[in-house]
Amino acid sequence: MARGYARSNDPLRAMILFSRVLWFDLVPDDYTFSSLLKACSKVKALKEGKQLHCFALKLGVSDDIYVVPTLINMYTSCGEIDDARRVFDKIDEPCVVAYNAIITSLARNSQPNEALALFRELQESGLKPTDVTMLVALSSCAMLGSLDLGRWIHEYVKKYGFDRYVKVNTALIDMYAKCGSLDDAVNVFRGMPKRDTQTWSTIIIAYATHGDGFQAISVLKEMKKEKVQPDEITFLGILYACSHNGLVEEGFEYFHSMTNEYGIVPSIKHYGCMVDLLGRAGRLDEAYKFIDELPIKPTPILWRTLLSACSSHGNVEMGKQVMERISELDDSHGGDYVILSNLCARYGKWDDVNHLRKMMIDKGAVKIPGCSSIEVNNVVHEFFAGDGVHSISTTLHRALDELIKQLKLAGYVADTSLVFHADMEDKEKEIILRYHSEKLAITFGLLNTPPGTTIRVVKNLRVCGDCHNAAKFISLIFGRQIILRDVQRFHHFKDGKCSCGDYW
């Protein structure tokens, strides 16, 4: 009964049942705790979960192989990842299920390095990983953009027969796509004897994020021929593909067919894709009206998507209107103030800039620093924007200084209009642009990889316009392909051109 309640829409009824069990002086066992902890996980009932943990300790079953994984999952679901790790660390001899629980917890809480470290520890312990272990390890590689390690895990998957699982192959496609190797992702997809809806959706999203919207649409048509039913994730990929390729009319056709043909109710993410579709195409008034007339309450993310479009198309007045709508819902996001203040600065509205910067300070809003990473010899190196402005004596920064000189000889001109400080000279602005995290990571790649090797960089924010331009010059001068993954998509730089066609 407890297990049944834990899986129901009212899982805490299991706790009410448990109190009756105690009233009758019945002693719970390990199976009881695992069901009850699952119920707490489902509704994030941390207080009740801790009470159960204490009770399990008193009864001596807190380190039971059935209780430990559910304890880890309960703390993770409640956002207490440190407590989850403490539970794991107290086990003398963890089983593979406990390892899977903590590795999954770390990966889901954006700690892929820690998850992969435990994956290696699991291997060294002599325990045999399961398909769940492989899924999480591949997911962690995808988060890091760690292609070399991902390829090693792929070999491990093939060696031990995990490639018989559709979900593991789907995770491989996702990993390769997110690590910038679309060809490898396609090869895994084409080599699969059996594919489910999730597999088809993953390859469609892969094509979309790499800027090949037409191929994404082609795969959807192939999917329909194979009589595989698309789902809401499939359509997210297709709408994303249309958005990043300027296919506005096609995007609306797919959006309507999703509901009319397949009965899929659009989620906030689908609406976000439509706002992005209109915004990128410069149809800002239509995008504003689209959000205003939604059948559900708009989220701040929808308005932020439009604010970004206002910035791209230089519409200050609409940007201000959109900012007001965002502030009504959430006024603590530093990125909103930065986007609008930069937009105002571009058009010399310095009073607005100063006002926005003061508001940002008053609200305690913080701007997320730009961070780019690159994997070299199985080690992921991270660089933050500004690294080097005050320490130009290192080998990397000297190399970047020399690189900029070479780029200038080839025609590169730093776009100082992207640095918004009224009292700053162009030379100072150029220094700020020079040490952006993308340029540092690419320079590190040039220094530490053989000539002709593809350079793969992952950035936590949107790539800046000046770095985008510089990467085109670097790919031309050095004959290197540069694959840059930012928060929105992939940019493939080759022979002085980018796959996005500057539509980004």
Image: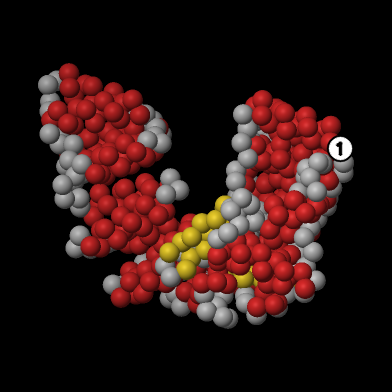
Q: Residue 301: percent from the left, percent from the top?
A: 65, 41
What amino acid does circle 1 point to? Lys
Q: Residue at x 61, y 50 (%)?
A: 390
The answer to whether residue 411 of the structure is visible from this angle is: yes
Q: Residues within 10 Å of mark 1 (few under 14, many from 20)?
A: some
* SS at badge 1: loop
The mark total stands at: 1
Is residue 290 shown left or right of residue 180?
right
The answer to whether residue 38 of the structure is visible from this angle is: no
Of 145 and 38, the residue lying toward us:
145
Task: Give the residue number, with chain letter if any, for mark 1.
Answer: 349
Is residue 303 shown left or right of residue 143?
right
* Residue with the most extreme top position: 23
Q: Residue at x 84, y 32 (%)?
A: 351
Q: Residue at x 21, y 28 (%)?
A: 54
Q: Quadrant where the C terminus lies?
A: bottom right
Is residue 183 shown left or right of residue 434?
left
* Residue with the most extreme front position: 393
Of 463 and 16, the residue lying toward us:
463
- The image quadrant that residue 245 belongs to is bottom right
